[in-house]
Image: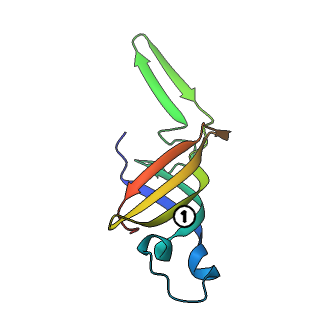
Amino acid sequence: MVSVAVLLANAELRVPLVRALSDGPIASNFFRNLQLTAFYDIGTSWSGAAPFSSGNSVSYEVIKQPPFEVEIKNYLNPWLYSYGFGMRSVILGYYMKFDFAWPVENFERQDPRLFITLGYDF
């Protein structure tokens, strides 16, 4: 599905653990940049009717097979969200992120997933 509109939100708590506990300069680049995180992400996307209206592409579908036409109303949650925890630091000169997240779809928590990311936050 290709969407033309999106709505996203993110909340993060970042704790620079070693910096918070250290009294002086930190020589190690890894420990100087180490952050523990907790996060919550939520979003939705759509084409046509907004996901909150009854005629949107997620909740309403028409299947035409002559001589019949079927209207299907799905009561799906248009929001996808996830929550979890992770860490960020510089490893071998590269900014790395390791996140452990639980995605939630239609109010059902899915199996946890590990995300490894190379690069800075946007």
Q: Residue at x 52, y 41 (%)?
A: 55
Q: Which residue is mark 1?
A: 10
Secondary structure beneath dot 1 equals: strand
Q: Residue at x 42, y 74 (%)?
A: 29
Q: Nearer the viewer, residue 83 or 64?
A: 83
Give the color scheme: rainbow, by chain, secondary structure or one colour: rainbow
From the top left corner, tell me how far across and down residue 79 is, in percent. 57, 49
Residue 16 visible in the displayed image: no
Q: Nearer the viewer, residue 108 or 118?
A: 118
Q: Residue furthest front?
A: 27
> Quadrant of the rendered structure where residue 42 is?
bottom right
Label 1 packing within 10 angstroms: few (<14), some (14-19), many (20+): few
> Quadrant of the rendered structure where residue 108 is?
top right
From the top left corner, tell me how far across and down residue 81 is, in percent. 58, 50
Q: Nearer the viewer, residue 102 or 61?
A: 102
The reply, left or right, for residue 82 in relation to residue 65 is right
Q: Residue at x 50, y 42 (%)?
A: 56
Quadrant the N terminus occupies: top left
Q: Measured along the vertical axis of the image, is residue 32 above or below residue 51? A: below
From the top left corner, tell me how far across and down residue 85 is, in percent. 60, 57
Residue 66 visible in the displayed image: yes
Q: How many marks?
A: 1
Q: Measured along the vertical axis of the image, is residue 86 above or below residue 25? A: above
Q: Residue furthest bottom?
A: 24
From the top left corner, tell me how far across and down residue 57 is, in percent. 47, 39
Please state which amino acid type lies under the numbered disc 1: Asn
Q: Residue furthest top?
A: 67
Quadrant the C terminus occupies: bottom left
